[in-house]
Image (cartoon, helix red, strand yellow):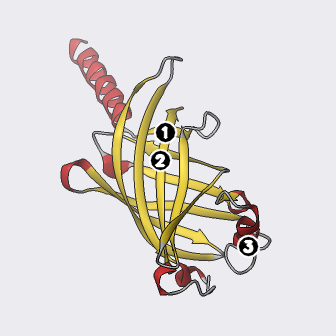
């Protein structure tokens, strides 16, 4: 009987440990405005044009002990592009660029997460933009995690990647200095 009880106790401990080792699920905190999808592109090679997407949502899973078990999924409303200039934003929504009438949503789905030097992360996945899916790698950093003042638990990350416009069938000629867009990401998630 003692052996049976000991076996059951050990089985319970192992199953609890396995459950604890699974990556936790987080919802990206867009409601509280603690997440940003920004971009920058060269303007004629003379300066930088900055912008952002105001509407997006997503989820990620994270386990600081096993980053390789993590994943990310984000959807972006492409019509929410905001470069702080109404006429330019109208042009960015047109078929010359984001083609929001035909492709109203851009998506990123991770396929793997690996650790790099000094705790940096490499998040590989597919970015679908303007109806084209391409593999990208986001260079990311885990900024921290912990309890918040409202009884929740949060984790935060920043990251960046660059994409070539022509890879997403965006052929508007902006000159040789403006063929790549840098995406700059800041994400805080609330554990579910």
Q: How far across and how far down the image is residue 1, in percent?
A: 25, 12
Decide: few, some or many residues near mark 2? Use Cα within 10 Å; few <14, some 14-19, many ≥20.
some
Quarter of the rendering containing residue 82: bottom right
- Residues at marks 2 and 3, CA–CA distance in whole angstroms: 26 Å
| Distance between the alpha carbons at the discs numbered 1 and 2 | 7 Å
- Residue at 59% across, 59% down: 51
Q: Residue at x 69, y 62 (%)?
A: 78
Tell me if residue 21 comes above or below residue 182 in the rendering.
above
Question: At which x and y percent is residue 135?
Answer: 46, 73
The C terminus, quarter of image: top right
Q: Which residue is the site of mark 1?
A: 188
The reply to whether dot 1 and dot 2 touch (C-beta < 8 Å) is yes
Near mark 1 (Cα within 10 A), the count class, few <14, some 14-19 or many ≥20, is many
- Taking the image as shown, residue 179 lies to the left or right of residue 158, namely right
Relative to 147, is 56 above or below?
Answer: below
Q: Nearer the viewer, mark 3 or mark 1?
A: 3
- Any mark on residue 91, and which? 3
Q: Can you identify the residue that label 2 sits on?
A: 186
Please name the residue shown 71% across and 68% down the image. Answer: 88
Q: Quadrant of residue 21?
A: top left
Q: Secondary structure at mark 3?
A: helix
Nearest to the observer: residue 41 or residue 5: 41
């Amino acid at each position: 009987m003692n052996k049976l009880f000991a076996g059951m106790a050990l089985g319970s401990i192992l199953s609890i440990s396995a459950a604890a080792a699974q990556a936790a699920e987080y919802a990206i905190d867009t409601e509280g405005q603690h997440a940003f999808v920004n971009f920058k592109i060269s303007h004629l090679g003379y300066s930088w044009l900055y912008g952002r997407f105001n509407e997006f949502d997503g989820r990620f899973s994270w386990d600081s002990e096993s980053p390789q078990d993590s994943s990310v999924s984000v959807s972006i409303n492409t019509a929410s592009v905001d470069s702080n200039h109404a006429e330019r934003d109208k042009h960015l929504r047109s078929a010359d660029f984001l083609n929001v009438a035909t492709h109203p949503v851009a998506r990123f789905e991770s396929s793997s997460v690996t650790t790099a030097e000094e705790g940096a992360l490499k998040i590989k996945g597919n970015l679908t933009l303007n109806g084209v899916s391409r593999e990208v790698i986001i260079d990311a950093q885990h900024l921290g995690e912990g309890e918040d003042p409202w009884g929740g638990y949060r984790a935060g990350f920043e990251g960046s990647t660059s994409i070539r416009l022509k890879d997403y069938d965006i052929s508007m000629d902006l000159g040789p200095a403006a063929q790549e867009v840098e995406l700059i990401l800041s994400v805080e998630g609330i554990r579910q």
